[in-house]
Amino acid sequence: MITRRKLIGSLAVGAGGVLLSGCNKINANPQVRSLLQSSEGLTMRAQRLITDRSALAREFGAADLSPVFRANGTRQPAGSAYEGHRVAGFADWRLVIDGLVARPMAMSMAQIQAMPRRTQITRHDCVEGWSAIGQWTGVPLKLLLDAAGLRSSARYLIFHCADRYAQADYYESIDLIDAFHPQTIMAWGLNGQPLPVANGAPLRLRVERQLGYKHAKYVQRIEAVDSLATQGRGKGGYWEDYHDYAWYAGI
Amino acid sequence: MTDDEREDGLALPEPNAPPPLPRGGDLVSRHRLSTRLWHWTNAFTIFVMLMSGLMIFNAHPRLYWGQYGANADQPWMQIGSSGGRGVLILGREVYDTTGVLGLWKDPNGVEQRRAFPWWATIPSTYSLSDARLWHLFFAWVLALASTVYFVVSLINQHLRRDLLPDMKELHPRHIWHDIRDHLRLRFPKGAAALRYNILQKLAYLSVILGLIPLLILTGLTMSPGVNAAWPWLLDLFGGRQSARSIHFLCAAAMLVFVLIHLLMVVLAGPFNEIRSMITGRYRLPREPRE
């Protein structure tokens, strides 16, 4: 029997369903999405225009450290190759720097750790909303780029990682404004210890003025390129390619 | 012959004398175009910002005070699920919110363990990236439209003439009188309805000068790029996680404002009120017959 309550209930559910499918259609509409995405470029240009491009991220004191530095994303790269490196203490790990450089290089961790180092206590802001303060030690990326001799045609750096995330190889990219920023380092230490596996051992990017997903972990190769179009799906990173995250993660 | 005299020698009303006050039942011009445009831009923008913001919250449904805060740290507020129950935890208090927060069923009847339910978020199924697309696009709309409105309202004196209360209105007795009238659903009639009453003024001003600027500024401090350039802004709010908490609390206050605002529209006569915000024309409520 159709009671009034049942009728009203099913009408409400029906209206909700129509509204919901309408909203989902709007959200999935490619034109709507490209309109929404257009604000990313506006945000990047506005931030670069209004703020000082060389401004340093806040550096904290030892008393400000998070008791536990949360790890996110890949915490343990799969596969025997990485496991072999881990067991060997990353003695055979190489950081390759190639692409649009004058002197392609392959550096061992010992060579990287022998270079001048920078230690900084900074806040890591994840796109999800949490923050953790950690002390990072590593070589300024600028020194590596100077050693390799970046060609004038290079516009971006692609960071190739040892981990796969979900369906694809993890990678990330930044432009040269962030690459030459004094706080942008290839970190091999966290809180005075060798970088833990969960946080990207043996080497990860720190790009302090962007959100966490830009900070590529398990970095094996830095490739200088003039365009991001040929890598992956061409949007400059794993999250950008597969989940429509912003390439410029300044907010 | 002066302008004040007609050919028949009868004097016109003094040019400086105020025009006769409209009375109850008159159709009057009530809201400026700039106010109406901003109102409807905001109505849509706030709706999108609140719902996409709740989805962003779902990515990490915990709030903290201070510079940092992640899963190992103590939140002051969190929404989650425990066993078969959805829970809201405020400090040490645990509230059962099964069906609404933390654990609920989606339209297909499938149980979901996310903080805010499908009907409260944009998009309706979990996607932090899509919520960010909506939130960060409409953040621009909110900020630009608010700036334009603010400048226009300063120039056309809307802020000073219509919204700033005078000393007499701020007297506690006057405010108390208005609160009692509102609680009895006695709203201004006739010419008195041409102007905002003190409770409206305080409500609108606290949104225009308080909530919206706070939401925009705390929103900016969610940006590590802005924080590097303007560290003083983050210091003002007491750190990244405090700023995120303030952002959330301001959004909650905004929701309360919207709900009360809608309730008042319904109580005051929705047709007349909505027409006045679309066309600008408003029929003054009739005075009670003496």
Image (cartoon, coloured by chain):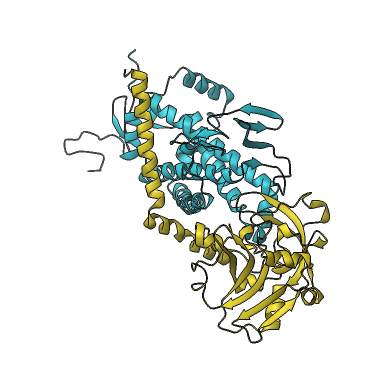
Q: Where does residue A105 sit, x and y in percent of width and height?
A: 69, 82
The quadrant holding residue A224 is: bottom right
Q: From where the camera sits, is residue A132 visible?
A: yes
Which percent across, then down, holds residue B13?
28, 34
- Between A86 and B127, the residue placed more toward the observer is A86
**Extreme-front residue of the structure:** A80
Instruction: Kindly indicate which chain is depicted in cyan in the rendered structure.
Output: B
From the viewer's perspective, is residue B32 above or below residue B98? below
- Chain ID, yellow in image: A
Which residue is at 59% across, 69% downward? A174
B68 or B269: nearer the viewer = B68
Q: Is residue B155 above or below residue A179?
A: above
Seen from this angle, which residue lies furthest bottom?
A: A102
Residue B213 or residue A25, whichever sits in front: A25
Most foreground residue, B200 or A120: A120
The residue at the point 74 percent across, 52 percent down is: A69
Q: Give the percent coordinates (x, y) of residue B87.
A: 62, 31
**Residue B36 visible (yes or no):** no
Please identify the quarter of the rendering in which residue A205 is found.
bottom right
Query: What residue do we see at 69% from left, 37% from top?
Result: B76
Residue B239 located left or right of residue A241: right
Q: Residue at x 74, y 68 (%)?
A: A85
Q: Is residue B2 left or right of residue A92?
A: left
Q: Quadrant of the N terminus of chain B?
A: top left
Q: Quadrant of the C terminus of chain B?
A: top left
